[in-house]
Amino acid sequence: MSGLRKSIPVVLFALLILPNLTVTDASATDQLWAGAAKVDITERDSGPVNDPMYARALVITDKQTTLVICSLDVVAIGEIGHIKDDFLGKVRGQIKADLQIPETNIMINASHCHGIPVKETDERTIQAIKEAAANLVPVQVGAGTGKEDRVQENRRLKMKDGTEIDVRHAYALPPDQEVAEVGPIDPEIGILRLDDQQGKPVAVLYNFACHPIQGAASGGNTADVTGFSSKVIEDNLGENTVALFVQGCGGDINPVFYKDVDHPRDAEPLGNMLGLSTLEGVRKITTTSDGRLKVINEKLKLPRADLAERIAQLESEQTRLVNSLNGTSLNLKTYLPLVVKYNLNSDFPSYYSHRYLYEEEQGRNQMTQMDKINRGNMERYTENILIMEKLTRLNANLRLLKKHQAQNVAAGSRTVEVELVGFRVGNFLMTTFPGELTVRIGLNIKKEAPEEHSFVAGYTNGYIYYAPTDEQLLNVGGAQEDSDSILAPGWQKIYENKAVEILKGL
C-alpha cells in the first residue's frame, strides 16, 4: 500500500490536465481516491501557546474531477485577522500551477477561531494540500450526522420592547427582566467519512455552527473549541486520520457561558464534548464505494446596504442618551457599599434592627429618612449606569455601521459579488458562502435541500462580514450581526434560493 500511495499522485497529476471548468462532473466513475494532511500554523513567537493551530487539507479525486477542501484554524480568509486579502489567490494559483487543479475546485474554510497564525500560513497551506495529494489512496465514503446541543447558544436576545441585542464582551448585557426570549441553535453535526480499503478512516469532515471564541484558561494562543474537538477525533480514530472542521452558519452562535466571570474561560471541555459527539456520529456511518464527485462554482451578486439614515438615527439616540444622564451625590466608592447594605436587608439596611425600633419608639425617623435619601441617590446612579451601558452598545455598533457605510460608498457599486461553491462526495452535499451566516439561514437551506445529508458552510473562500437575516437587518444598530454587515435587506432570499439551486444541481 505504501508504494501505491507514492505512485498515484504521479499518475494522476502527470497524465490528467484538469480543465478549468466552473462545473465538473464525473458521476459515472466508481472509485474515489482521497488523501489528507495537516501542517502546524501556530505563531509561537508572539506569546505563550496553549494548543496548536493547523492547516488541514483533504484532496478527493476520481481521476477526472479533483476537489480540494482546506480547513484553517484562523478567524477569516482575508479582510480581518492575520490572513491577508491575497491569501486565497496565492494558494489557488500555486496549486493550479503545481497540481493542475482548477482554482474553482479549491475550497478554503476558516474555523473562525481568534488565534494567531504564522505569517507564512499561505505557504504552509500549500504544503498541506501537496502532502494530502501525495497521500492519495482508494477510499469508500459515507455521510451521516451527529448531535451536540450542550456547547453553544444563540447570542441574540429579543427584548420585551421588540428590539434585539447580542451577547458580546464589547458591551454589557441589559437587565435580566428586560429579556423576553432567545433564538434557535442548530445542534446538527454534518459528517463526511472517508475510509481506506482496510476500513481505516483517512479523514473526517465535520460541519457545525458555533463561534470558537471561548479562549484558553491559560490565556495562550489556541485553536479554541474546534481545535480540541478535532484533536479528540484524530486521537480516537488513529494516528494518520485528519479531522477537518468546517464552520457552518455560526454568525449568531456563541459558546455557552461566554460571559462567565466565576470560572476560567476554557474551550477544552466544550471541544471535548463536540469531538465525542462527532465520533458517535462517525461510528454510525457505513462507508460504501459511492464514486459520485461533483463541484459547482458560481458567482452571485447581492445588494449592498445604504446605512446613512440608520447612522443618523443612532447618532440622534446617542445625543439623547448622553443628555439623559443626571447628577447624583454618589460616586462608585460610595455607591457600591450602599448597594450591598440595602440588598442584604431592605428593612434595616443602615444598622441593626434595634436602632430602627428604638427611634420608632421615640417618635423619630432619622434612620428611615436617611434610607429614603440613599435609595433615591442609588436609583439615580443605577439609571446612569444603565444609560451608560446602552451607550457602550450603541457606540460599538455605530462604529461598525460607519465603517461599512464608508466601504459601500467606496465600492462604487450597489452590489457585492460573492463566490459560492457546491460539492458532492458520495451522498454528502455542501454549499458555501464567504460571510458569517446566521443560524436561521442554515436551517432554512437545510429544510429546502434536496437530500438528507445536505449542509451549509460559511466563512469560505473570502470574507464579507456578517450575513444576518432580513428580519435581523431591520434591527440595524442593535447587535453586531446587523451592524457589522454590508448587505441590504432582500439579500437573504436571493442567496437562499441560489444555495438550494446549487444543492439540487449536485
Image (cartoon, rainbow, N blue to C red):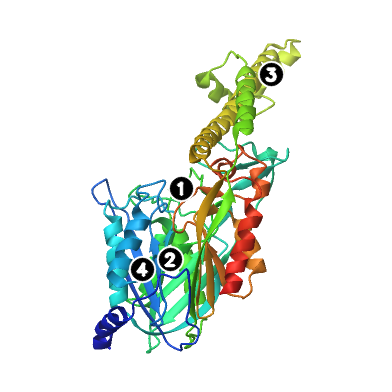
Front residue of 259/19: it is 19
Does 298 appear above or below 382?
A: below
Q: Dot 4, crowdedness within 10 Å: few (<14), some or many (≥20)?
A: many
Does dot 2 land on a helix, a strand or a loop? helix
Query: Which of the marked residues, 3 or 2, is nearer the chain's N terminus?
Result: 2
Which residue is disc 1 drawn over? Answer: 263
Residue 104 marker: 2
CA–CA distance between discs 4 and 2?
16 Å
Which residue is disc 3 drawn over? Answer: 356
Query: Which of the marked residues, 3 or 4, is nearer the chain's N terminus?
Result: 4
CA–CA distance between discs 2 and 1?
45 Å
Image quadrant containing the C terminus: bottom right
Front residue of 284/133: it is 133
Does dot 3 land on a helix, a strand or a loop? helix
Residue 426 percent coordinates (x, y): 50, 81
Q: Are marks 3 and 4 in contact (CB under 8 Å)?
A: no
Residue 149 marker: none
Does dot 4 land on a helix, a strand or a loop? strand
Give the number of the mark in front: 3 or 4.
Answer: 4
In percent of the image, x 60 and y 49: which residue is there? 468
Label 2 is placed on what type of residue? Thr
